[in-house]
Image (spheres, rainbow, N blue to C red):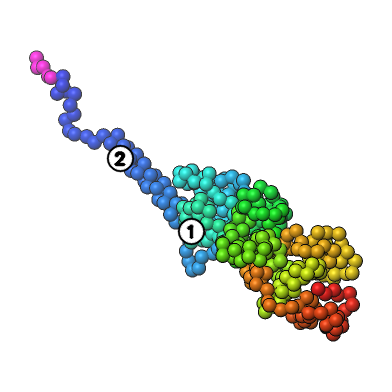
Amino acid sequence: MRTYSTELSRQPRYPTKRRGGYVSRWSVSLIVIVCLSVALYGIRIVFLPAQENNGNAVHTTITVEKGASFRQVASQISETGLIPHHVAFVALGKLMGVEEQIHPGKYDLNSHMAPSTILNVLATGQTIPYWVTIPEGYSMQQIGNLLEEVGITTATRFVQTAHDTEVRRTLGIEGDTLEGFLFPDTYRFHHGTSPRDIIQVMVEQFQQVYTPEIQQQARERGLSTLEVLTLASIIEKETGAGEERALISAVFHNRLKRGMPLQSDPTVIYALPSFDGNLRKPDLQYDSPYNTYRVRGLPPGPIANPGWASIMAALHPAPVPYLYFVSKNNGTHHFSSTLAEHSRAVYQYQKRPNRRTS
């Protein structure tokens, strides 16, 4: 009887291919394809713009409100078509670790930006800058109105902050107001910049130009910084003609030396609760420490924020004996040393009897 090895009998006579090998290879291939697809989609989401870069970029302005969640911001941007989907954008933000770093403000985004670029812009606060020119002679209220018009902050918040005692103390400002210390200039601000930051920039600009040398000039005239700014603000409001500033300054200096009231219309206008552009005789009796028809000497503080030229005029009055001036109705004034001469000038130049003069 023949015997066969059990091991040999279990071996196939001819080699065969196992179906499981094909299945395994196809599974690996499928996984590789899926992974590559996901990777390519991820690269597309992160590094490539959502829109085709054909021609010029299309710009879109978005506003990120203070307190808005990252998901809300993502949805807002998604609606513009600048990102493929807000969910992927949120995931990317979490991956980049910037979801809690989004700054409020207005942003200029465009169709050439990749999602990663947009995230970087938002996380680093690259908001749209506003170049704001504060004209010489603007009051705090007017500055607040201007800032509100351009969309940086509200006039109410600005004025309230300017009246804050703690803000003045922090900035080292004497007196009861920041009026006069907000230096007129051109500034670069951003949407949402706090009133306190705006005020700090403007006051620091004043402190930079009001040098120790100028402070010494003021002391030599017996004037404090507040008094210089108060006089300069009146000069600023009295004339827009640069060549007249030193003459206007001389009139007020001469009156102060003689104990005469300044009788400056702009001080009355500043004191009035409302002004329609026409100063009337009863207004001159308005009870206010700013009314220089009723109160002798300088008012308690500036009536506006003077520019550099008016500050210099306050410190350097022209060497003239003038005590009076009257508008010539052409932007300039006639100056007089005596009341009789002034009366003749009033009769000559003033065509409206309800118009007052200094």
- Left or right? Give the position of 276 relative to 101: right
Where is the N terminus found, in terms of image quarters? top left
Circle number at residue 25: 2
In this rendering, is residue 333 above or below 106?
Answer: below
Name the kind of residue labelled 1 in the image.
Answer: Met
**Residue 108 seen in this snapshot:** yes
Give percent across and percent down for residue 324: 79, 76
Give percent across and percent down for residue 73: 58, 49
Question: Does label 1 or label 2 sit earlier along the sequence?
Answer: 2
**What kind of element bears circle 1?**
loop
Query: What residue sits right under mark 1 in the picture?
Result: 113
Q: Counting other residues with Cα less than 10 Å from the Cα at mark 2, is it few (<14), some (14-19), or many (20 or more)?
A: few
Give percent across and percent down for residue 162: 69, 54
Magenta region: which residues? 1-5
Name the kind of residue labelled 2 in the image.
Answer: Arg
Q: Is residue 3 magenta?
A: yes
- Left or right? Give the position of 16 relative to 257: left
Magenta-drawn stretch, dominant element (helix, strand or loop):
loop
Give percent across and percent down for residue 355: 86, 75
**Residue 143 seen in this snapshot:** no
Where is the C terminus found, in terms of image quarters? bottom right
In this rendering, is residue 280 above or below 348?
Answer: above
Tell which residue pokes out farthest to the top in this image: 1
